[in-house]
């Protein structure tokens, strides 16, 4: 059994953010799963500038659709990170092999996906700010999962 957390990106649309998330996953020991379609090509110069030499295609799994992704997760926990949740990530007990799902930067996940996921968490923000950058959010949540499960090196 894989004891590494997995970061899943739903149809990412900003190449620099995805590249920064790849670097974070590579450096912290998480797998990355990308639900296509992406809003950019991996040959995009903005992507390459940020990802540098951190791109390891063996640590990335691509899914052609959200249906394919959720079929593969039928017996696993998927935790959706969303600004539309009342529950804070800090009050949640992560498991080492959780899949931490993040929506598109421009639109989150569709309502039907949001409603179908049991575990929905948020990062609380002051003064009703809208949201953090997705790469920052991934780093916060992944670090908390690693801390709780004593996986940080």
Image (spheres, rainbow, N blue to C red):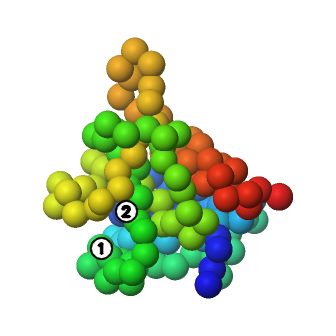
Identify the residue position indicated by label 1 in the image. 66
Q: Residue at x 34, y 70 (%)?
A: 37
Q: Residue at x 61, y 66 (%)?
A: 96
On the image, which quarter does residue 11 sit in? Answer: bottom left
User: Which corner quadrant holds the N terminus?
Assistant: bottom right
Callout 1 crowding tier (Cα within 10 Å): few <14, some 14–19, many ≥20: some
Q: Decide: marks 2, 1 in contact (CB < 8 A)?
A: yes
Q: Is residue 68 visible?
A: no
Left or right placement of residue 48 versus residue 83 in this view: right
Q: Position of residue 90 (x, y in %)?
A: 52, 39
Q: Residue at x 40, y 15 (%)?
A: 127
| Residue in front for this viewpoint, 53 or 60 | 60
On the image, which quarter does residue 82 sit in? Answer: top left
Left or right placement of residue 56 versus residue 108 in this view: right
- Residue 10 tag number: 2
Of labels 2 and 1, earlier in sequence is 2
Q: Residue at x 24, y 56 (%)?
A: 114
Q: How many marks?
A: 2
| Residue in front for this viewpoint, 40 or 59 | 59
């Amino acid at each position: 059994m894989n004891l590494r957390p997995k970061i899943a990106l739903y149809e990412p649309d900003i190449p620099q953010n995805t590249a920064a998330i790849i670097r974070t996953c590579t450096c912290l020991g998480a797998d990355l799963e990308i639900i296509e379609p992406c809003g950019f090509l991996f040959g995009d110069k903005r992507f390459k500038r940020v990802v540098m030499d951190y791109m390891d295609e063996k640590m990335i799994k691509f899914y052609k659709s959200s249906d394919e992704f959720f079929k593969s997760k039928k017996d696993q926990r998927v935790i959706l990170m969303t600004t539309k949740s009342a529950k804070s990530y800090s009050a949640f007990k992560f498991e080492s092999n959780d899949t931490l799902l993040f929506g598109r930067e421009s639109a989150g996940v569709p309502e039907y996906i949001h409603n179908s996921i049991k575990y929905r968490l948020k990062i609380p923000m002051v003064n009703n700010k809208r949201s953090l950058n997705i790469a920052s959010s991934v780093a916060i949540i992944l670090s908390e999962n690693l801390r709780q499960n004593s996986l940080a090196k």
